[in-house]
Amino acid sequence: MHRKWLDSMHMARSDTSPPRPGRAVADQAGAGAGRGPRSVEDGRVAGLGAAPAFAAAPPRPAIYTARVSPRSSALLLAAALACRPDVSRETASPPARDPSAPSSSSASKSQPAAAPAPAPEPESAPVADPEPGRLAGITAAHNRHRAQLDIAPLTWSPELARYAQKWADKLKRRACALEHRPRKGPDAQKHGENLFAASGQAATAEQVVAAWVAEVAGYDAKTGRCRGVCGHYTQVVWRNSQRLGCGVATCGDSEVWVCNYDPPGNFLGQKPY
Protein backbone atom coordinates (compact mmCIF):
# COMPACT_ATOMS: atom_id res chain seq x y z
CA MET A 1 0.00 0.00 0.00
CA HIS A 2 2.83 2.29 0.77
CA ARG A 3 4.23 1.59 -2.76
CA LYS A 4 0.89 2.45 -4.27
CA TRP A 5 0.73 5.71 -2.36
CA LEU A 6 4.18 6.71 -3.69
CA ASP A 7 3.09 5.94 -7.23
CA SER A 8 -0.09 7.95 -6.81
CA MET A 9 1.86 10.87 -5.28
CA HIS A 10 4.29 10.96 -8.25
CA MET A 11 1.39 10.84 -10.67
CA ALA A 12 -0.25 13.72 -8.88
CA ARG A 13 2.97 15.79 -8.99
CA SER A 14 3.39 15.11 -12.70
CA ASP A 15 0.10 16.86 -13.38
CA THR A 16 1.16 20.00 -11.56
CA SER A 17 3.49 22.79 -12.77
CA PRO A 18 7.27 22.19 -12.62
CA PRO A 19 8.77 22.63 -9.17
CA ARG A 20 10.22 26.04 -8.41
CA PRO A 21 13.99 26.32 -8.21
CA GLY A 22 15.38 25.25 -4.86
CA ARG A 23 12.77 22.76 -3.92
CA ALA A 24 14.48 19.52 -5.01
CA VAL A 25 17.75 19.91 -3.14
CA ALA A 26 18.60 16.64 -1.40
CA ASP A 27 21.06 15.36 -4.07
CA GLN A 28 22.93 18.65 -3.90
CA ALA A 29 23.29 18.62 -0.13
CA GLY A 30 24.11 15.14 1.12
CA ALA A 31 21.17 12.78 0.34
CA GLY A 32 21.57 9.20 1.50
CA ALA A 33 23.42 6.76 -0.71
CA GLY A 34 21.23 5.03 -3.28
CA ARG A 35 18.27 7.34 -2.75
CA GLY A 36 16.76 9.66 -5.32
CA PRO A 37 16.17 13.40 -4.92
CA ARG A 38 13.92 14.47 -2.14
CA SER A 39 11.70 17.51 -1.95
CA VAL A 40 10.82 19.90 0.83
CA GLU A 41 7.60 17.94 1.45
CA ASP A 42 9.57 14.75 2.22
CA GLY A 43 10.77 16.30 5.46
CA ARG A 44 14.52 16.06 4.66
CA VAL A 45 16.42 19.08 3.44
CA ALA A 46 20.15 19.56 3.08
CA GLY A 47 21.67 20.59 6.35
CA LEU A 48 18.72 19.55 8.56
CA GLY A 49 19.05 15.72 8.60
CA ALA A 50 16.03 13.74 9.92
CA ALA A 51 13.67 16.09 11.74
CA PRO A 52 12.01 14.22 14.67
CA ALA A 53 8.61 15.73 13.85
CA PHE A 54 8.54 13.97 10.48
CA ALA A 55 10.69 10.84 10.84
CA ALA A 56 8.14 8.78 12.84
CA ALA A 57 5.01 9.85 10.96
CA PRO A 58 4.05 7.89 7.81
CA PRO A 59 4.13 9.79 4.54
CA ARG A 60 0.84 11.45 3.68
CA PRO A 61 -0.67 13.11 0.60
CA ALA A 62 -0.67 16.83 -0.12
CA ILE A 63 -2.19 17.74 3.26
CA TYR A 64 1.10 16.64 4.80
CA THR A 65 2.60 20.09 4.53
CA ALA A 66 -0.32 21.63 6.44
CA ARG A 67 0.89 19.95 9.68
CA VAL A 68 4.33 21.57 9.63
CA SER A 69 4.77 23.85 12.60
CA PRO A 70 5.62 27.52 11.95
CA ARG A 71 9.07 27.11 13.50
CA SER A 72 9.84 24.07 11.29
CA SER A 73 8.53 25.89 8.22
CA ALA A 74 10.93 28.72 8.88
CA LEU A 75 13.81 26.25 9.20
CA LEU A 76 12.78 24.49 5.98
CA LEU A 77 12.55 27.76 4.09
CA ALA A 78 15.91 28.91 5.40
CA ALA A 79 17.53 25.61 4.40
CA ALA A 80 15.95 25.74 0.95
CA LEU A 81 17.18 29.27 0.39
CA ALA A 82 20.65 28.32 1.59
CA CYS A 83 20.77 25.59 -1.05
CA ARG A 84 19.92 27.98 -3.90
CA PRO A 85 23.08 29.36 -5.41
CA ASP A 86 21.25 32.17 -7.17
CA VAL A 87 19.54 33.34 -4.01
CA SER A 88 22.73 33.15 -1.95
CA ARG A 89 24.46 35.40 -4.47
CA GLU A 90 21.58 37.83 -4.45
CA THR A 91 21.35 38.08 -0.68
CA ALA A 92 25.10 38.08 0.04
CA SER A 93 26.25 41.39 1.45
CA PRO A 94 29.18 43.10 -0.30
CA PRO A 95 32.57 42.84 1.41
CA ALA A 96 33.36 45.64 3.79
CA ARG A 97 35.65 48.29 2.35
CA ASP A 98 38.57 49.62 4.28
CA PRO A 99 37.75 53.30 4.85
CA SER A 100 41.45 54.19 4.85
CA ALA A 101 41.94 52.69 1.36
CA PRO A 102 41.28 55.22 -1.41
CA SER A 103 38.55 54.39 -3.85
CA SER A 104 39.37 53.73 -7.47
CA SER A 105 37.87 57.03 -8.54
CA SER A 106 39.80 59.04 -5.98
CA ALA A 107 43.02 57.19 -6.75
CA SER A 108 42.69 57.97 -10.41
CA LYS A 109 42.07 61.61 -9.63
CA SER A 110 45.11 61.91 -7.37
CA GLN A 111 47.51 60.57 -10.00
CA PRO A 112 48.62 63.13 -12.57
CA ALA A 113 47.73 62.39 -16.16
CA ALA A 114 50.56 60.90 -18.17
CA ALA A 115 52.18 63.41 -20.45
CA PRO A 116 51.70 62.65 -24.13
CA ALA A 117 54.68 61.09 -25.82
CA PRO A 118 56.65 63.63 -27.80
CA ALA A 119 56.27 63.40 -31.52
CA PRO A 120 59.31 61.83 -33.17
CA GLU A 121 61.55 64.35 -34.78
CA PRO A 122 61.62 64.10 -38.55
CA GLU A 123 64.76 62.60 -39.88
CA SER A 124 66.98 65.23 -41.35
CA ALA A 125 67.82 64.80 -44.98
CA PRO A 126 71.44 63.89 -45.65
CA VAL A 127 73.57 66.94 -46.29
CA ALA A 128 74.46 67.17 -49.95
CA ASP A 129 78.06 67.64 -50.97
CA PRO A 130 78.74 71.34 -51.52
CA GLU A 131 80.99 70.74 -54.53
CA PRO A 132 79.54 70.64 -58.06
CA GLY A 133 79.81 67.78 -60.56
CA ARG A 134 82.85 65.55 -60.40
CA LEU A 135 84.26 67.51 -57.48
CA ALA A 136 81.53 66.23 -55.15
CA GLY A 137 82.97 64.64 -52.01
CA ILE A 138 86.46 66.06 -52.25
CA THR A 139 86.07 68.18 -49.08
CA ALA A 140 84.80 65.19 -47.10
CA ALA A 141 87.72 63.10 -48.37
CA HIS A 142 90.14 65.70 -47.00
CA ASN A 143 88.36 65.87 -43.65
CA ARG A 144 88.39 62.12 -43.06
CA HIS A 145 92.17 62.13 -43.03
CA ARG A 146 92.32 65.29 -40.94
CA ALA A 147 89.93 63.75 -38.39
CA GLN A 148 92.29 60.81 -37.89
CA LEU A 149 94.83 63.33 -36.57
CA ASP A 150 92.27 65.32 -34.56
CA ILE A 151 92.64 68.29 -36.92
CA ALA A 152 89.74 70.69 -37.58
CA PRO A 153 87.88 70.07 -40.86
CA LEU A 154 88.13 72.20 -43.96
CA THR A 155 85.15 74.03 -45.40
CA TRP A 156 84.32 74.35 -49.09
CA SER A 157 84.92 77.86 -50.49
CA PRO A 158 83.21 78.80 -53.77
CA GLU A 159 85.66 81.70 -54.12
CA LEU A 160 88.65 79.38 -53.92
CA ALA A 161 86.89 76.98 -56.28
CA ARG A 162 86.63 79.70 -58.95
CA TYR A 163 90.31 80.51 -58.41
CA ALA A 164 91.28 76.84 -58.85
CA GLN A 165 89.06 76.34 -61.88
CA LYS A 166 90.58 79.39 -63.61
CA TRP A 167 94.02 77.80 -63.38
CA ALA A 168 92.72 74.37 -64.44
CA ASP A 169 91.22 75.93 -67.58
CA LYS A 170 94.56 77.57 -68.39
CA LEU A 171 96.32 74.19 -67.98
CA LYS A 172 93.79 72.69 -70.39
CA ARG A 173 95.04 75.08 -73.03
CA ARG A 174 98.46 73.62 -72.34
CA ALA A 175 97.29 70.01 -72.98
CA CYS A 176 96.65 69.52 -69.24
CA ALA A 177 100.29 70.09 -68.31
CA LEU A 178 101.04 69.51 -64.62
CA GLU A 179 102.29 72.97 -63.63
CA HIS A 180 101.87 75.06 -60.49
CA ARG A 181 100.98 78.71 -60.60
CA PRO A 182 104.01 80.96 -60.91
CA ARG A 183 105.33 83.04 -58.04
CA LYS A 184 105.00 86.27 -60.01
CA GLY A 185 102.82 87.77 -62.70
CA PRO A 186 99.06 88.01 -63.23
CA ASP A 187 98.64 84.32 -62.26
CA ALA A 188 100.88 84.53 -59.21
CA GLN A 189 100.12 82.05 -56.46
CA LYS A 190 98.23 83.43 -53.46
CA HIS A 191 97.23 80.16 -51.72
CA GLY A 192 98.41 76.65 -51.06
CA GLU A 193 98.03 74.33 -54.06
CA ASN A 194 97.88 70.61 -54.88
CA LEU A 195 97.80 69.19 -58.44
CA PHE A 196 96.81 65.76 -59.77
CA ALA A 197 96.96 64.44 -63.35
CA ALA A 198 95.63 61.20 -64.84
CA SER A 199 95.15 59.69 -68.27
CA GLY A 200 93.31 56.70 -69.69
CA GLN A 201 90.39 56.88 -67.23
CA ALA A 202 88.52 59.44 -65.17
CA ALA A 203 89.50 59.67 -61.52
CA THR A 204 87.13 60.24 -58.58
CA ALA A 205 87.53 62.81 -55.82
CA GLU A 206 88.36 59.98 -53.40
CA GLN A 207 91.13 58.69 -55.68
CA VAL A 208 92.65 62.14 -56.08
CA VAL A 209 92.90 62.73 -52.32
CA ALA A 210 94.08 59.16 -51.72
CA ALA A 211 96.97 59.70 -54.12
CA TRP A 212 98.08 62.75 -52.17
CA VAL A 213 97.68 61.09 -48.77
CA ALA A 214 99.72 58.05 -49.93
CA GLU A 215 102.82 60.22 -49.55
CA VAL A 216 102.55 59.73 -45.77
CA ALA A 217 104.65 56.60 -46.27
CA GLY A 218 107.74 58.79 -46.73
CA TYR A 219 106.93 61.34 -44.02
CA ASP A 220 108.34 61.24 -40.45
CA ALA A 221 105.93 63.12 -38.20
CA LYS A 222 108.40 63.24 -35.29
CA THR A 223 111.22 64.93 -37.19
CA GLY A 224 109.16 66.56 -39.96
CA ARG A 225 111.47 65.04 -42.58
CA CYS A 226 110.39 63.48 -45.85
CA ARG A 227 111.86 60.82 -48.13
CA GLY A 228 110.77 61.62 -51.67
CA VAL A 229 107.67 63.83 -52.14
CA CYS A 230 105.43 64.60 -49.14
CA GLY A 231 104.19 68.16 -49.83
CA HIS A 232 100.76 67.09 -51.15
CA TYR A 233 100.13 65.06 -48.00
CA THR A 234 101.31 67.77 -45.63
CA GLN A 235 99.04 70.34 -47.34
CA VAL A 236 96.01 68.06 -46.96
CA VAL A 237 96.58 67.80 -43.18
CA TRP A 238 98.07 71.26 -42.55
CA ARG A 239 96.47 72.34 -39.27
CA ASN A 240 96.21 76.07 -40.03
CA SER A 241 94.44 75.61 -43.39
CA GLN A 242 90.70 76.26 -43.05
CA ARG A 243 89.14 76.61 -46.53
CA LEU A 244 89.32 74.56 -49.72
CA GLY A 245 88.38 75.08 -53.37
CA CYS A 246 89.05 72.81 -56.36
CA GLY A 247 88.68 72.64 -60.15
CA VAL A 248 89.11 70.00 -62.87
CA ALA A 249 89.71 70.10 -66.61
CA THR A 250 89.90 67.34 -69.24
CA CYS A 251 91.99 67.06 -72.37
CA GLY A 252 90.75 64.07 -74.37
CA ASP A 253 91.55 61.04 -72.23
CA SER A 254 93.68 63.08 -69.81
CA GLU A 255 92.64 65.33 -66.97
CA VAL A 256 94.12 67.68 -64.40
CA TRP A 257 92.83 68.51 -60.92
CA VAL A 258 93.69 71.69 -58.97
CA CYS A 259 92.95 72.33 -55.27
CA ASN A 260 93.77 75.56 -53.42
CA TYR A 261 93.97 76.01 -49.63
CA ASP A 262 93.63 79.07 -47.41
CA PRO A 263 95.58 79.86 -45.36
CA PRO A 264 98.34 78.07 -47.29
CA GLY A 265 100.56 75.36 -45.78
CA ASN A 266 104.00 73.87 -46.30
CA PHE A 267 106.06 76.62 -44.73
CA LEU A 268 109.73 75.80 -44.31
CA GLY A 269 110.72 74.95 -40.77
CA GLN A 270 107.11 74.23 -39.66
CA LYS A 271 105.30 70.93 -39.11
CA PRO A 272 101.81 70.38 -40.44
CA TYR A 273 100.44 69.30 -37.04
Image: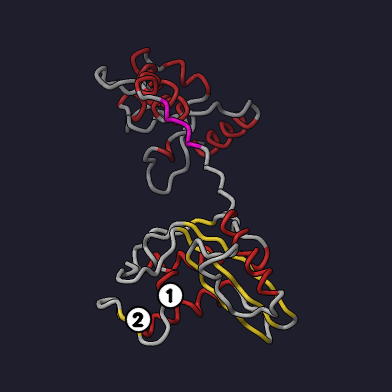
**Location of residue 109 in the rendering, given as x and y in whole percent from the top left corner:** 39, 20
Residue drawn at (44%, 63%), measured in percent from left and top? 264
In the picture as drawn, the residue positioned furthest to the top comes out as: 70
Label ID, residue 194: none
Could you tell me the amino acid type at mark 2?
Tyr
- Give percent across and percent down for residue 211: 51, 80
Tell me: 1 left or right of 175: left
Residue 112 as seen in the image, left or right of residue 140: left
The residue depicted at 52 percent of the width and 42 percent of the height is 120
Task: Tell whether label 1 touches label 2 (CB within 8 Å).
Answer: yes
Instruction: Give the quarter of the image for residue 166.
Output: bottom right
Look at mark 1 in the image and give the residue it sits on. 233
Expressed as whole percent of the image width and height from the top left, the position of residue 180 reads 55, 73
User: In the drawing, what numbered circle is on residue 219?
Assistant: 2
Question: Which sits in the foreground, 177 or 55?
Answer: 177
Q: Is residue 261 above or below residue 83?
A: below
**Number of residues whose C-alpha sits closer than 10 Å to that of mark 1, classed few (under 14), some (14–19) or many (20 or more):** many
Residue 263 vertical placement versus 204 (above, below): above
* Start-end of magenta stretch: 113-118
